Each structure stands twice: as structure tokens, then as C-alpha cells.
Amino acid sequence: MGVRETIIGFSYLVASVLFIVGLSGLTHPRTAVRGNLIGALGMLIAVAATLIDLRIVSFDVIIAGVVVGAGIGAILALRVPMTAMPQMVALLNGFGGGASVLVAGASLVETSVLAGTYGTQATVATAASGIIGAVTFWGSFVAFLKLQELMFKKPVHFAGLQVLNAVLFAASVGLGVMIVLHPEETMYYWALVGVASVLGVFLIIPIGGADMPVVIALLNAYSGLAAAATGFVLGNNVLIIAGSLVGASGVILTQVMCKAMNRSLTNVLFGIMGPTAETAGADEVYAGKIKATTAEEVAMLFDSARRVVIVPGYGMAVAQAQHAVRDLMNALEKKGIEVEFGIHPVAGRMPGHMNVLLAEANVPYDKLKELDLINPTFEQTDVAIVIGANDVTNPLARTDPKSPIAGMPILDVDKARTVVVIKRSLSPGFAGVPNPLFAADNTLMYFGDGKDAVIALVNAIKES
Amino acid sequence: MDTFLIALTIFVLAIFVGFEIITKIPPTLHTPLMSGSNAISGITLIGAIISSGAQHTMLTTILGFVAVVFATINVVGGFMVTDRMLSMFKKKVR
């Protein structure tokens, strides 16, 4: 091994260590900013070391690519609104997967041009990079379109979709075997990428909005695994390490999300909802029991309240109501009321979505409580305010084993003395079932757009 | 030990390290975790740099160039957006 190789190898080791140290920094909000910077430093070291590699004969294409990519990346990062973060993460996942496909492909072509020898490790890994990377790229693109509401807003189902996906998967594995047997025929690789691309599209189109957190987490795992596979292609340890760290992260988040919905990954992936047996219709549940209220009435509730819990959902993101919610928190605290937030793991469209929005609005993170911490406190809560959340507060999950959401962990807002639900209408959530919470004796429905309703409420509190 | 076994060993051990760390990350930071880890998976950039710099054929140079663009978007966009998010997480001012 020459001096250069030693320097490069050592730098990759340092980079790998920095990635691990950086991720550990994310275990606490206090150290997280530094952790992220440490990760970025690791990346910088890895890239700088790569530039002294003797195989590089010219830097102009590299510089052009980095300038274009950095420009696009920086613009996206600085301009994306916090509410659009799920789309942003989907896009980033996709670019990572796409890069893996191209790097593995370029490596295969190089070996064929240079008449080099193909190791089995490299060819198997090339096939894996191609399949996982292409599925990640196109799947993420479809997820982006869905989240941005450009296309496939409604889940797309058609007869034979699952059979088609099975066939596409079998075909890509078959082409993968052909690559291993005949690596000099690079056409097999591009055919594999084509088939896996179609698979990526069809895998994601049947998935519904509220299941998006699972999909984003899963695509995150795939983008990591694609990078690790590319590491096997190139025999590069830092790619393997970084890729497997990200893969592990995505897998854990996927599990957390599935558990929080009490749904199996298979059900999410195939767009299957739980048992849809005879659940009560909306009319039956709501008829004559809904009590609509006004900002003034709700404001009066706070005169005698000592503790309020706010439960946000995707509706808060859609209405961009996070700043108004912060004002509500401040107005209540001014009256000496204790305010906390109950955050369901799948509230929103990606893991941690609500937390980021509320952080943007300067709500301190220590006020945001997880399900397990907030649930025991509802019995001592005077008013629970639900903003744009539905299924995650539905008591049917606890009581009706036949309901599609049976067994899903929910926020027990119904145990608070009074529940105020801010919502546009009585329309059902993603699970498509009525929510008996809205008809409960201690529930008041405050109909309206999330943002306008909260602003009116804040004004009413200030006037009272 | 042959190179495949070494690579596989590293892969499996790194996954265990990943599980150990990630399970300790609080749900409130799950979105920055995704975007930040995503930036790290942009490490494919170093493979892309070699392909586009070695310039063996027109095809590999083009593939390398596009890969560099994609991976750089991933890296730069990922780290920057994560930084932007994380700097918003503040503790209560007492």
C-alpha cells in the first residue's frame, strides 16, 4: 500500500468515527447541532481524501458536479418551509438512492472497458445497488409527488397490483442473477434498473397519506442500504459503515411508526387497513350529540383552568397554524395556566413532523411530551385542545376490537375534564371511521380553519 | 480472511452500532435524524467522484457527473436543512 492509499484509508476511518460520534450527538437537542456539524466534518474529510486518489485524471467534471449539486442542495435547504419537510426528506432519500444506482453502474461499465476481472462480491453488490437504489429513487419521487399533492393524492389501487409487484421483483432478481453470471453484458444492469424503477413506482402509489411516515422511514432505510451495497461494489469501508448506520436508523424508525399505528409493515406496504367489519356509521355516532362552540365560550373555559394539553395533528401543518398555536400557549401561560403538548408518534406525515413545526414557532422542546408521558396526565387536565388530529385521539382504538384502528396506541384526550376539538368538519380521518370523541359529553366542537380558529381564540382570551 | 468476509464483518458490526445509537435518539429529534442520517448516506459521493474523475469512457464520466450532482444535493441539502431545523430546538427560558 502506498502513502496515498494509507492516507486515504486512514481518513476514511476518521470519517467513519466522526459519523458515529455525530449521530450520537443527536441523542439530545442540546448536543444535536454540534453532532450534525461533526457528521458534516466527517463527510468533508472523506471527500478531501478521495480527491488525492491517483485514479482521478481530471477535476473539471468533479468540480462542475459539486457546484451544481451544492447549489441545488443549498437552495432547497434554505428555502423549504418547515411544513414541507416530509417532501424534502423524500427528495433527499431519492437523490441518495439515485447516486448509488449510477455509481454501481459506472463501476460495472469501467470494469468491462478496462477488461478487468469481476469478483462475485462486486457483481452481487452491483445488482443489489441497482435494485435498492432504483426503488428508492422512484419510490421517493412518488412519495414527493404525493406529499406535495401534485399527483397520486388518493392511494392508487388496482386488481393484480400485488401480483404485478411480485413479478417485477422476481424479474429484477432474475436480471440480478444474469449480471452475476454475465457481468460483461452491461445491458442486464440497465434492464434491471428499468424494472426496479417501475417496481419503485408501483410499490408506493397504493400507500395512503397517514401511512406516509412509515414510507418515508422505510425509504430512508433503503437509501442507507443502497449506499452500503455500493460500498460492497467498490470495496469501500466508509460507504459500508455510513450506509449501515443509516439503514439501521431507517429500520428503527419504520418499526417505531408501525408500532404507533398498531399495523404491520406488510399491511402498510400493501395499503391494507385493519378489519373493516361493521363499525357504526357517522350518523349513528354523531346524531344530536355534537355540541358546537365559539371562541368566546372556549375562552371562558380557561378562566377556571389550571392545566391545558394541546394535541396537534396533520391539520395544524396544513393550516400552517404552528405560530398561532404558540401564541395560544403564551396567552394561556400568561393566565398562569400550565400548558403542555401531547405528540403522537405518527402525527403528521413523517416521524417528528409536529416537533419540528412547533420548534420553528419557538415552542420549547421540553413542553412536547410523548404518548407514554402525557397519557397519565389527562385525568388532571382541565382542557385538552385537539388541533387537526383525528384518528390518534379516537377512543374506539381502546374499546372496539372490530375497528380498523383497534389496538392503536392513542392519546387519551377523552379523559380530560373538557375536550375542545378544532376541526373544519366532522369528516373522518385516514382510517375512515367516525370518532366518538366528537360526540362525547365532555367534548366541544370548535369548527373552523385551524389557524383562523386559534387566532380568534387567542383574541377572545386576551379580551376576557 | 478474504475481503468479502472483512466487508461483511464491518457491515454487521456497523448495523449493531447504528441500532445502539439510534434507539437512544428521542422522538422529538426524529425528523432531523432522518435528514441528517440521509446526508451521511450521501457518502456515495466519494464513489461518484472517482468515476467522474477517472474518465475511462464518456459513459462512465457522464454517469459519474450525474452521480456527483445527486450525491452532493443529498450531502449539502441534508446537512444544511438539518442544521436549520436543529437550531430551532430551544429549551424553555426560565
Image (spheres, grey):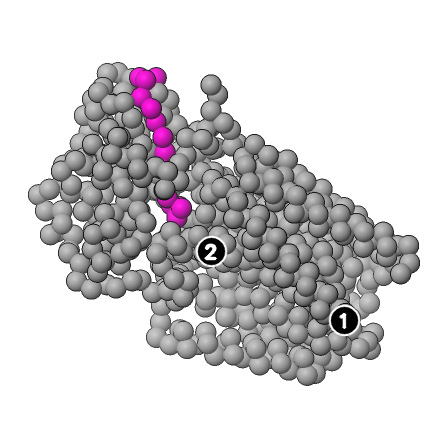
Residue A343: in magenta span? yes
Query: Badge 1 is on which residue?
Result: B2
Q: Are marks 1 and 2 on the same chain?
A: no
Mark 1 Cα within 10 Å, few/some/many (few <14, many 20+)? few
Point out the frontmost of discs 1 and 2.
Answer: 1
Residue A130 sits in quarter:
bottom right
- Picture residue at 74% right of the left edge, 55% below the top: B46
Q: Which of the chains bears the disc numbered 1?
A: B
Q: Tag 1's secondary structure?
A: loop
Q: Is residue A73 visible?
A: no
Q: Residue furthest left?
A: A288
- Picture residue at 31% right of the left edge, 62% below the top: A273
- Picture residue at 68% right of the left edge, 63% below the top: B9
Amino acid identity at mark 2 = Thr
Q: Is residue B9 visible?
A: yes
Q: Tag 2's secondary structure?
A: helix
Q: Residue furthest front?
A: B1
A307 horizontally vs A104: left or right:
left
Q: Position of residue A395 (x, y in %)?
A: 23, 47
- Picture residue at 21% right of the left edge, 20% below the top: A304
Q: Are marks 1 and 2 in contact (CB under 8 Å)?
A: no
- What mark, if any, has residue A254 been given in the picture? 2
Cα separation, mark 1 vs mark 2, equals: 34 Å
Residue A28 sits in quarter:
top right
Q: Which residues are magenta?
A: A334-348
Q: Nearer the viewer, residue A337 or A107?
A: A337
Q: Position of residue A234 (x, y in %)?
A: 74, 65
Q: Is residue A120 above or below residue A252?
A: below
Residue A310: in magenta span? no
Q: Nearer the viewer, residue A25 or A213?
A: A25
Q: Which of the chains bears the disc numbered 2?
A: A
